[in-house]
Image (cartoon, grey):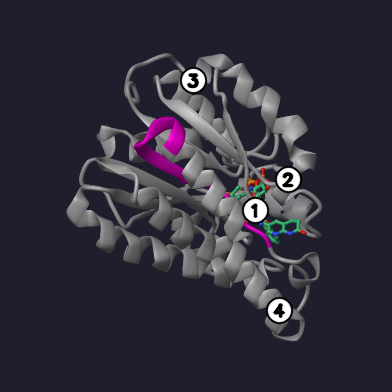
């Protein structure tokens, strides 16, 4: 992912926004941040805890951002602090990027009905879906008309993906939340959309049991016969968060090399890839 993927422009000039979900340089939220920054946006970041500050601080500073707030979305006090800090520094904002998900590791393997516990379900839905409702409410309270929000989802919400399990249920909820939030904020000219990205090698995708198979299968079975490039995800976020995206709201936009569009993959590339 090189600089030429983020050509300078002015699509986000004069706009300010909050990026939630950068863990390191591989994070989808970081690619989105770079794309928005290249177009003139002013950015603030949240980070999840002290362990991640070491990684996120140099990234934020590297693009001239001096608003960096610790925020655990399950902790109301840190949510309060995040948005009151933004209110103090900026007063108003123009956009929100939500790129946060979590389920317990033991929930993300094997049988869905056997391994999904009440607490595991509650935690996955709380962190991965409710947090968008909460952040959207707080952000909208200080958002200019014509603002926009984006969250990140995955095809496991629409179709069964082995081991994605309760995260698929959480993403289905997140996509429904996106539509309801879009309806609430539409009258104010605020647009709310989700990007459904194909598998990308980030911290959140590391160490998933079936990872090697999944990347190989996605490459072979997608329309473009390639894995998803995070630059395309960042480009979609730029479109949805800038005025290029006018009239687009409540949408789940797939950026996955066309994987979602295929009903049955061609025989040869699959044989070549999987043997
Ligand atoms: P990532 O690990 O870089 O980002 C996940 C982020 O979630 C981290 O920054 C982490 O700190 C944050 N997070 C988790 N629990 C939190 C909490 N309680 N409070 C605050 N923050 C918390 O991985 P990523 O792949 O960039 O994930 C970003 C988003 O993209 C997620 O919603 C993920 O579901 C989605 N997504 C990822 C892929 C993929 O294949 N990587 C595909 C489609 C969608
Ligand atoms: O949304 C995700 C992953 C989100 C995620 C990742 C982790 C790993 C570490 C949520 N919770 C956790 N909990 C942990 O303990 N993706 C879209 C990436 C992903 O994860 C999968 C996938 C894909 C794709 C898990 C199983 C199968 C496919």
The residue wearing badge 4 is 119
Q: For the residues carrying marks 2 and 3, which lies nearer the camera in this image?
A: 2
Q: Earlier in the sequence, mark 2 or mark 3?
A: 3
Residue 21 falls within the magenta-colored stretch = no
In the picture provided, is 23 more to the left or to the right than 245? right
The residue wearing badge 2 is 49
Residue 190 is situated, as x and y percent measured from the top left of the image, at 27, 48
Could you say which quadrant of the image residue 226 lies in? top right
Q: For the residues carrying marks 4 and 2, which lies nearer the camera in this image?
A: 2
Residue 83 is situated, as x and y percent measured from the top left of the image, at 48, 46
In whole angstroms, how far apart are the C-alphas of marks 3 and 4? Answer: 41 Å
Ligand 1 has an atom within 8 Å of the beta carbon of the residue at disc 1: yes
Instruction: Work out which residue is located at the far front of the displayed protein and give it.
Output: 88
Q: Are circles 4 and 1 on residues that touch, CB within 8 Å? A: no
Q: Which mark is residue 118?
A: none
In whole angstroms, how far apart are the C-alphas of marks 4 and 2? Answer: 22 Å
Q: Earlier in the sequence, mark 3 or mark 1?
A: 3
Boundaries of the magenta span = 88-102
> SS of the residue at dot 2?
loop
Q: Are circles 2 and 1 on residues that touch, CB within 8 Å? A: yes
Residue 161's place in the image compared with 150, above or below, is: below
Q: Which mark is residue 6?
A: 3
**Which one is nearer the viewer's eye here, 203 or 275?**
203
Residue 19 is situated, as x and y percent measured from the top left of the image, at 52, 39
In whole angstroms, how far apart are the C-alphas of marks 4 and 1? Answer: 18 Å
């Amino acid at each position: 992912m090189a600089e030429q993927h983020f050509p300078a422009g002015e699509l986000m000039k004069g706009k300010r926004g909050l990026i939630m979900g950068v863990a390191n340089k591989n994070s989808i939220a970081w690619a989105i941040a770079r794309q928005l920054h290249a177009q003139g946006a002013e950015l603030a970041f949240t980070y999840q805890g002290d362990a991640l500050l070491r990684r996120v601080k140099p990234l934020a500073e590297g693009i001239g951002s001096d608003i960096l707030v610790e925020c655990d979305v399950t902790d109301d006090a840190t949510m309060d602090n995040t948005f009151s800090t933004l209110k103090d520094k900026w007063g108003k904002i123009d956009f929100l990027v939500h790129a946060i998900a979590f389920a317990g590791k033991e929930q993300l393997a094997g049988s869905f009905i056997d391994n999904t516990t009440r607490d595991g379900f509650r935690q996955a839905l709380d962190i991965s879906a409710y947090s968008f409702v909460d952040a959207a409410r707080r952000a909208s309270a200080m958002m200019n008309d014509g603002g926009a929000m984006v969250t990140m989802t995955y095809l496991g919400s629409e179709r069964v993906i082995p081991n994605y399990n309760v995260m698929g249920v959480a993403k289905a909820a997140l996509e429904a939340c996106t539509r309801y939030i879009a309806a609430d904020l539409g009258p104010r000219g605020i647009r709310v959309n989700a990007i459904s990205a194909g598998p990308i090698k980030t911290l959140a995708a590391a160490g998933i049991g079936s990872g090697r198979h999944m990347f190989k299968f996605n490459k072979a079975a997608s329309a473009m016969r390639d894995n998803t490039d995070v630059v395309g995800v960042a480009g979609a976020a730029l479109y949805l968060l800038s005025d290029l995206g006018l009239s687009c709201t409540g949408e789940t936009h797939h950026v996955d090399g066309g994987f979602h569009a295929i009903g049955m993959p061609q025989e040869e590339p699959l044989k070549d890839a999987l043997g």
